[in-house]
Amino acid sequence: MGDPIARNLHKAGMAVTVYCRTPATRQAFRGSGIAVSDSAVNAIQASDTTILLVPSGQDVDQVLGRGTHGRIPFSLDGKTIILMATVAPSYSRDLASAVVEAGGRYIEAPLSGSRAPAESAQLVVLASAPEDAWIGDAMPVFDAIGKRVLRCGTVPTAMRMKLANQLLLIATFEAISEATHFARESGLAVNLFLEMAMAGPLANDVLRMKAPKLLVDDFEQQAPIRHVFKDIGLVCDEAEQRGLWLPIARANRDLFELAMRRGQANDDAIGIVKVLRNHEAA
């Protein structure tokens, strides 16, 4: 989602510098009016505020050059770091300490929404920071990319809020896929089943987005299985640390892990329907 977020910030009149680890992605910004940096450090130094939007904490460490000591090896004096990746709450807390130690300000701001809401600047931003005023200063950034900002309190409350959201979202992906699989294998007209679902009390944006894809077995990624598996793993890890029993989350972790082992990392989340089909066929 970094591409549409950067473009919406630029559209809002902000001077934007991007760094992308993939050369082809960097090339896509050429001629857009958005500056392209040759390194993460240079992009950070060129900006007052930096958004980190990479898949995992390990990727964040790589971008920031954090070694086993966990420190950031350059100054962040006068700079704000906004983490929009979904990571373990404990990791976000540690990163906050590292950013402040390097002289910067830290905001965790995971997002609710996928690429389509990102393109239309309709994301929901969940924000936490060591000091609430830091969130207030970042509001022009959030307003340029989202429709609502929820101030969740101190770090890592926003990250825990994101995990709760992902628990619900991933269960919805699975339920839609499984119900459609059941309808198809029961001899029902899948188009009528999905039409009924979208006309009833369970209709929602996720169903409206996924129903057309399920109807034609379109598994091109919107929310890829590799990200879903990572997020449900974070949910289960956090639950286990707190002594919580989440049976459906655990079942979904196993299901998406099986999809990963079958080479479906780049399929959309609804691609787990292939696991259901193959399991029954076996």
Image (cartoon, rainbow, N blue to C red):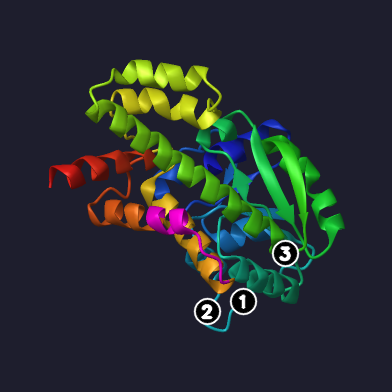
At label 1, the amino acid type is: Pro
Circle number at residue 174: none
Q: Which residues are magenta?
A: 243-252
Q: Residues within 10 Å of mark 1 (few under 14, many from 20)?
A: few
Q: Residue at x 54, y 49 (%)?
A: 166
Residue 12 place in picture, x, y as percent: 72, 33
- Residue 170's place in the image compared with 130, above or below, is above
Q: Quadrant of residue 260?
A: bottom left
Residue 185 place in picture, x, y as percent: 23, 30
Q: Residue at x 51, y 17 (%)?
A: 199
Q: Residue at x 69, y 69 (%)?
A: 96
- Secondary structure under tag 3 reads loop
At label 3, the amino acid type is: Val
Q: Mark 1 = which residue? A: 73
Q: Are marks 2 and 1 in contact (CB under 8 Å)?
A: yes
Give the spatial CA distance, label 2 vs label 1: 9 Å
- Residue 195's place in the image compared with 127, above or below, is above
Residue 102 place in picture, x, y as percent: 72, 74
Select label 2 or label 1 by which is in front. Answer: 2
Give the spatial CA distance, label 2 vs label 3: 22 Å
Q: Mark 2 = which residue? A: 67
Q: Is 190 included in the stretch rendered in magenta?
A: no
Magenta segment main secondary structure: helix
Q: Is residue 77 left or right of residue 261?
A: right
Looking at this view, is 186 or 15 the one in front? 186
Label whose residue precedes the other's in the sequence (3 or 1): 1
Circle number at residue 155: 3
- Secondary structure under tag 1 reads loop
Label whose residue precedes the other's in the sequence (2 or 1): 2
Q: Residue at x 42, y 29 (%)?
A: 210
Q: How many marks?
A: 3
